[in-house]
């Protein structure tokens, strides 16, 4: 109970409670390596969605038509990126989604590329 006599649970829980509940408190452990621009696509049928939690079903429906990035899914669902990574990782592990992460960059850009960019900036 608070000092004014109201219960603590009458207060607004804030924006972090829902993501915590959606992921069941999990974050960052035992997940697939997913980047903001990792593309995911559904491999199952929409009919299989009925047995899953709402957020999982929403992700599968969104990824049915075309591949979407982790960032696009988070924006559409209005969830934190960390929460979406947990949910998508669960769906990948269960075989509902396929993912393609970007190729890692190798070293620094070449000098020719940097010179070309510099020339382009000078021409502006």
Image: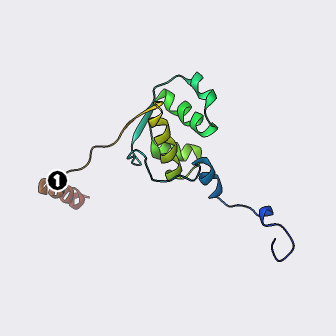
Residue at point 49%, 40% (across, down): 90
Residue 67 visible from this viewpoint: no
Q: Whole-percent x and y of residue 79?
A: 57, 50
Residue visible at 34% across and 42% down? 101
* Picture quadrant of residue 17: bottom right
In this picture, residue 41 sits left or right of residue 8: left
Q: Which residue is mark 1?
A: 113
Of residues 63 and 2, the one nearer the viewer is 2
Residue that extends furthest to the front in the rendered view of this protein? 30
Name the residue located 40 percent from the left edge and 38 percent from the top edge: 39
Compared to 119, does 64 lie above or below? above
Quadrant of the rendered structure where residue 69 is?
top left
Q: Position of residue 118 (x, y in %)?
A: 19, 60
Query: How far across and how far down the image is residue 56, in percent?
Result: 57, 37
Quarter of the picture holding the N terminus: bottom right
State whether residue 95 appears in this view.
yes
Give the camera-side residue of 70 and 26: 26
| Coordinates of residue 22 in the picture (x, y in percent) | 61, 47
User: With respect to residue 8, does 90 lie above or below?
Assistant: above
Residue at 26% from the left image edge and 58% from the top image edge? 124
Question: Of 62 and 23, which appears nearest the observer?
Answer: 23
Position of 28 compared to 48: left or right?
Answer: left
Q: Please, what secondary structure does the residue beneath circle 1 have?
A: helix
Q: What is the crowding at mark 1: few (fewer than 14 residues within 10 Å), some, or many (at least 20)?
A: few
| Image: 29 above or below 3 | above
């Amino acid at each position: 109970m608070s000092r004014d006599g109201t219960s603590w649970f009458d207060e607004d829980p804030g924006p972090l409670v829902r993501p915590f509940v959606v992921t069941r408190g999990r974050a960052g452990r035992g997940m697939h390596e997913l980047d903001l621009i990792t593309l995911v696509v559904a491999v199952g049928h929409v009919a299989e969605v009925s047995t899953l939690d709402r957020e999982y079903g929403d992700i599968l429906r969104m990824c049915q038509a075309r591949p979407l990035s982790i960032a696009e899914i988070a924006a559409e669902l209005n969830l934190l990126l960390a929460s979406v990574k947990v949910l998508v990782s669960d769906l990948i592990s269960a075989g509902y989604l396929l993912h393609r992460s970007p190729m890692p960059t190798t070293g620094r850009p070449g000098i020719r590329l940097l010179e070309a960019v510099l020339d382009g900036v000078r021409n502006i």
